Image (spheres, rainbow, N blue to C red):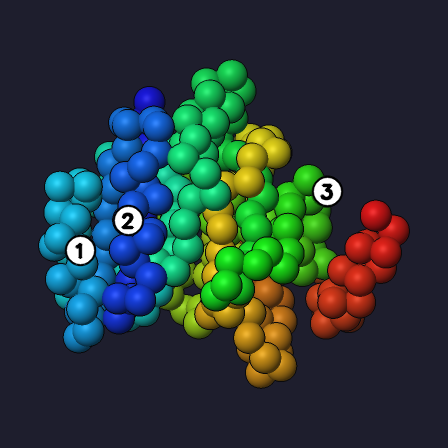
Amino acid sequence: MKISIITVCYNSAKTIDKTILSVANQTYKNIEYIIVDGNSNDNTLRIIQKHDDKISKWISEPDQGLYDAMNKGIEMATGDLIGILNSDDTFNSTTVIEEIVNFHRHNDIDASVGNIVQHKDNNKIVRLYTSKYWNPEKLKIGFMPPHPSIFLKRELFGLYGFYDLGFKIGADYELITRFFLKNKITWKYSGIITTAMLVGGLSSSGSSSYKLITKEIQKALKMNGIVFSPNLIRTRFLWKVIGFLKK
């Protein structure tokens, strides 16, 4: 089984070295590693070129943003499964891909969802973001599994489409809604902690971002013909707190 891992980056010189090495150091070796750079003007390209022997394919050219770059990577991919590894993140251990492959070999599914840990610059873990209690119905109230923990069959993109560039920060939510809820792909919780994510991503910083993703969650559900309550979407933070206290 070949696994395509896609990293998109722009001016990521501070972090991408660790990202590349976390792929290169995986115990599972049938990995197609693809990097899509958005025409960086720092030392990112120099670092990519330094690790050229560890990378299957890479391009550097202007794009229309994060999701356009992801789509380019998916179009380049030839693996059985596709996973996304952000340019400031790393795999949580050297055995992650081996564990993912074994999980998919023993389960006839279109996708697996797992867990990630979020950490600060000093590597102190501040959160375990888990899919253990998630199911597609929770998309109707604003909850999605951690995007980097999802591994999808490549063929799904041909069947159901790519990331929608009409979203600024919610295209991953829309794609998950389209795949899991509208088209009801088969999936299973893996229990694997796939990724160590640096806190402060595109869709996780500040009240203005919260308002934007709230708007885009509703847009994603409407586009896919999903009936939902706008009030539950707007108050999802409260439901998260209640769920945490119950656990």
Which residue is at a point 63% across and 59% down the rendered structure image? 126
Amino acid type, label 2:
Ile
| Residue plotted at (74% across, 65% down) | 236
Kind of residue sitting beneath label 1: Ile
**How dense is the environment of label 1, judged by Cα within 10 Å: few (below 14), some, or many (20 and up)?**
many
Name the mark nearer the viewer: 2 or 3. 2
Residue at the (59%, 79%) spot, across then down: 206
**N-terminal-most mark, 2 or 3:** 2
Residue beneath label 2, please? 20
Q: Are marks 2 and 3 in contact (CB under 8 Å)?
A: no
Q: Earlier in the sequence, mark 1 or mark 3?
A: 1
Determine whether 171 is above or below 5 in the image.
below
How far across and how far down the image is residue 21, in percent? 29, 46
**Badge 3: few (under 14), some or many (20 or more) residues near its Cα, within 10 Å?**
few
Q: Position of residue 163 (x, y in %)?
A: 39, 56
Q: Which residue is mark 3?
A: 133
Looking at the image, is mark 1 or mark 3 nearer the viewer? 1
Element marked by disc 1: helix
